[in-house]
């Protein structure tokens, strides 16, 4: 079965391009670029607190597509690739999802997040990034 190297979707034999990403399909998926267990989180900062699972998923996807490392934490812990999403696992109390980004990517991430969410992002930003 062929796979899309970008979104990692699996396709039926005979299909040669991803219908979502328009990428040429490959026979085997390449390994994931970032293994979070090997990441040094010393320079990561919490830049925003979101109350919506949907917003958390969208910002994580949007920033990763732009090549920005991002981890979203909830009271249940990291859910980036483990699938721990939804109201059955987490009921937010106030700001339920913390968006964590390496310091050197904060400015770029802020521009993208502001374009995606506008005032929602502006209100969710954490000081000193809430400028």
Image (tube, grey):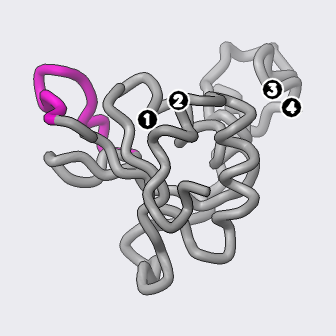
Seen at 88% across and 24% down, the residue is 22
User: Which label sits in the foreground, 1 or 3?
Assistant: 1
State the residue position of label 3: 21
Please give the range of residues in magenta: 81-93
Q: Secondary structure at mark 2?
A: helix
Q: Which mark is residue 56?
A: 1
Distance from label 1 to label 4 (Cα)?
A: 26 Å
Mark 4 touches mark 3? (CB < 8 Å): yes
Q: Residues within 10 Å of mark 1 (few under 14, many from 20)?
A: many
Q: Position of residue 64 (x, y in %)?
A: 64, 48
Is residue 104 left or right of 52 when viewed as pictured? Answer: right
Of mark 3 and mark 2, the one earlier in the sequence is 3
State the residue position of label 4: 23
Seen at 58% across and 37% down, the residue is 61
Q: Quadrant of the C terminus?
A: bottom right
User: Which label sits in the foreground, 4 or 2?
Assistant: 2
Q: Position of residue 52 (x, y in %)?
A: 35, 26
The front one of 120 and 4 is 120
Secondary structure mostly seen in the magenta stretch: loop
Q: Secondary structure at mark 4?
A: loop
Q: Residues within 10 Å of mark 3 (few under 14, many from 20)?
A: few
Quarter of the image where one finds residue 88 = top left
User: Which label sits in the foreground, 4 or 3?
Assistant: 3
Distance from label 4 to label 2 (Cα)?
A: 32 Å
Distance from label 3 to label 2 (Cα)?
A: 28 Å
Of mark 1 and mark 3, the one earlier in the sequence is 3
Q: Which mark is residue 120?
A: 2
Is residue 1 left or right of 77 when viewed as pictured? Answer: right
Seen at 20% across and 53% down, the residue is 77
The front one of 89 and 51 is 51
Quarter of the image where one finds residue 116 = top right
């Amino acid at each position: 079965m062929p796979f899309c190297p970008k979104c990692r979707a699996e396709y039926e034999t005979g299909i040669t391009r991803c219908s979502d990403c328009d990428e040429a399909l490959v026979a085997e998926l390449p390994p994931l670029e970032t293994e979070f267990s090997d990441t040094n989180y010393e320079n990561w900062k919490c830049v925003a607190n979101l109350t919506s699972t949907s917003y958390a998923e969208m910002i994580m996807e949007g920033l990763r597509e732009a090549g920005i490392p991002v981890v979203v934490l909830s009271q249940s812990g990291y859910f980036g690739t483990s699938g721990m999403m939804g109201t059955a696992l987490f009921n937010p109390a106030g700001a339920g999802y913390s968006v964590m980004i390496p310091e050197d990517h904060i400015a770029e991430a802020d521009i993208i997040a502001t374009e995606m969410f506008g005032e929602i992002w502006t209100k969710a930003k954490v000081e000193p990034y809430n400028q």
